[in-house]
Image (tube, rainbow, N blue to C red):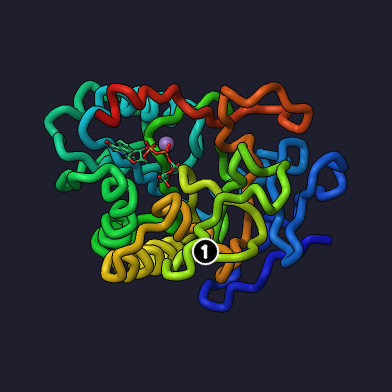
Amino acid sequence: KCHLPPSPKLKPVNHVDDSLDLGSRTDVKTCTTWGAPIMWDGMFDPDVYDKHHIKMGASVALTVFAIGRYLETYLMDFLSSADRHFMVGLPVTYYVFTDAPENVTGVNLKAGRTLETIMVKRHKRWQDISMMRMETIADAIQTRIRHRHRYVFCMDVDQVFVGRFGSEALGDSVALLHSSFYNTPQETYTYDRQPNSTAYMETGDFYYHAAVFGGTWQSVRNLTESCLRGIMTDKRNGVEALWHDESHLNKYFWLHKPSKVLSPEYCWNFLNGPSREIHVKRLLWAEKHYDILRS
Ligand code: 2GW
Ligand code: MN
């Protein structure tokens, strides 16, 4: 049986994850060595999770950045698909961080869902646009989110919801298996391997994808602050981790094990071939247009 690790800082919320049927999927790994469930379709009853979290009054913040051309290219599809599939039935606030708030217009949200636009400055280097999200998220948790939401999810904007991404994904500290590495050996993981970077690691548990992470606001604040400290130390030392914030996130989750792991159903690359383990796709990568977006 897969037991959730105790989280002493949090009042125990009655253990809805105990209703997981870890034996229902024998083709995939459903539990980590430290006892965190790995969420695959078929292991859980969505209604049990929804009823539990509705009863607990759970409320969810979803942070997303849309800076420069990423706003016109991705934001509307991301938000309208989130309205259809992300945490339906729970109160959700979208926190949109952008350098052009005036262009966040014409979004029609379902009842119980709200949107806040927060102005951020645009970093010159794209690596900094990506990495410095850690600073902005930590700030937003401190100043706004912690007063209103127990849970926070942080996502890339270049993706589209296509299936349920529901309350089964909520947990104390939640990481996502990268769809390119969930079934490949450890040697293929693209961890940072520069000994002078704070993100340096030799071995790890999995390769996690920074396009989706979450947890309680306390856990996400701790994660974003830690990653930011690593990023700033690296800058002082004139080094940058191989995959930027994602390298720091992998280091963090190696040192602080997530209490729940999401299967790649929760962020699937449409370019991957068909895969027998993937019974449902919940969130898909959107097409990249690096030629225009990174020019
Ligand atoms: C990023 C890279 C190159 C050119 C532009 C940008 C960019 C990113 C931008 O101009 N405006 C912007 O809002 N962003 C935000 O940063 C946006 O939310 C986007 O989804 C996020 C990460 O950038 P993205 O999606 O282009 O990078 P990916 O999909 O290659 O991301 C993986 O690796 C990144 C680090 O290199 C991050 O760790 C990311 O979380 C990973 O999914
Ligand atoms: Mn992305």
Say which quarter of the image contains residue 179.
Answer: top right
Task: Using residue 273 as the reference point, say whether residue 24 is left or right of it.
Answer: right
Q: Residue at x 62, y 62 (%)?
A: 259
Q: Residue furthest left?
A: 102
Task: Point out residue 103 in the picture as x, y percentages from the top left corner.
Answer: 16, 27
Residue 39 to residue 4: above or below: above
Q: Residue furthest bottom?
A: 8
For the residue labelled by badge 1, is the local secondary structure a helix, a strand or a loop?
Answer: helix
Task: Using residue 178 as the reference point, say whether residue 101 is left or right of it.
Answer: left
Which quadrant is the N terminus positioned in?
bottom right
Q: Look at the image and tell me whether residue 11 can be seen.
A: yes
Residue 289 to residue 217: above or below: above
Q: Residue tagged by mark 1?
A: 251
Label 1, residues with CA under 10 Å away: few <14, some 14-19, many ≥20: many
Task: Point out residue 225 in the picture as x, y percentages from the top left corner.
Answer: 36, 67
Q: Residue at x 32, y 23 (%)?
A: 291
Residue 51 to residue 102: above or below: below
In which quadrant of this rendering is ligand 2 seen?
top left
Say which quarter of the image contains residue 151.
Answer: bottom left
Which quadrant is the C terminus positioned in?
top left
Q: Nearer the viewer, residue 197 or 57?
A: 197
Say which quarter of the image contains residue 268.
Answer: top right
Q: Residue at x 65, y 47 (%)?
A: 188
Please state which amino acid type lies under the numbered disc 1.
Lys
Task: Point out residue 10 in the picture as x, y percentages from the top left corner.
Answer: 53, 72
Disc 1 under 8 Å from ligand 1? The reply is no
